[in-house]
Image (cartoon, rainbow, N blue to C red):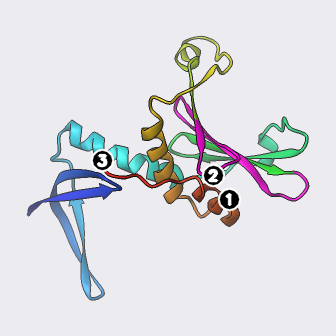
Amino acid sequence: MTCQITLKAEAVSFPLNAKVARIVAAGAGAVAGLDLTSNDYKERRCLVQVLEPISMGATLKQVSPEAVSQTESDLVALRYYSSASSTLTVWRQNTDDKIHGFELHVQDYYIRSTPKAPEIKIYIDENHAEAKTTDFGSLRLRQNDEEARELRRLYNWIALHLSDQVPDDLNEFLQRYRTEFGSD
């Protein structure tokens, strides 16, 4: 049997063609498994764009503290790595373990907290493409306001789907930086 489903996230809708692959009785209802392979590249790419940030947040796991270089004397850096190739660095105060700030690195972008939630700063690494072909030079960050709305949405979706490996106080801190969007 074929059907069409629509995934909705905030004000964004993604209609997808589907085939019912399997139906299993579950309690008082049923669970249907869907095959989405009949969609063309554009629709599959839209689906990946929805699932990718969910995966980024849901697979975050803390890196061994010994593997994280400490550059600030009054802060302790902790790092979380996602199997979806993103990293979250969190700085905690040395004295009381209170969270000082965070940086979320996704591809060429860096999303950083500011002292005033929900304000974040978004940077792009202008050196990244060059570093891939040379000897991994240093970061050359530039504040990026052109793609800020899309990256803020990406942040929101990641923060909504954080792994249970993320401590509760960090989860609460990250939630303060989410913002609501109106219709696009």
Kindly identify which residue carries mark 3.
47
Q: Nearer the viewer, residue 53 or 133?
A: 53
Q: Nearer the viewer, mark 2 or mark 1?
A: 2
Can you name the residue that lies furthest to the left here?
Answer: 1
Q: Quadrant location of residue 140?
A: top right
Going 20% across and 68% down the picture, which residue do you hit? 22
For the point 59% across and 45% down, the residue is 119
Q: Nearer the viewer, residue 70 or 96?
A: 96
Q: Residues within 10 Å of mark 2 (few under 14, many from 20)?
A: some
Of the numbered discs 3 and 2, the one sitting upstream in the chain is: 3
Q: CA distance from mark 1 to mark 3?
A: 28 Å
Q: Amino acid at mark 3?
A: Leu
Label 2, on which residue? Answer: 117
Magenta span contains residue 45:
no
Q: Earlier in the sequence, mark 2 or mark 1?
A: 2
Residue 42, image x, y percentages? 22, 37
The correct choice, above or below, for 13 with respect to 3 in the image is: above
According to the image, label 1 marks what residue? 170
Pair 1/3: label in front: 1
The residue that appears at 50% across and 30% down in the rendered structure is 145
Query: Between marks 2 and 1, how big is the CA–CA gap?
Result: 14 Å
Of circles 3 and 2, the one toward us is 2
Residue 165 visible in rendering: no
Mark 1 touches mark 3? (CB < 8 Å): no
Q: Secondary structure at mark 2?
A: loop
Q: Residues within 10 Å of mark 1 (few under 14, many from 20)?
A: some
Q: Tag 1: residue type?
A: Leu
Q: How far separated are the C-alphas under marks 3 and 2?
A: 30 Å
Q: Which residues are magenta?
A: 94-121
Secondary structure under the numbered disc 3 in the rendered image: helix
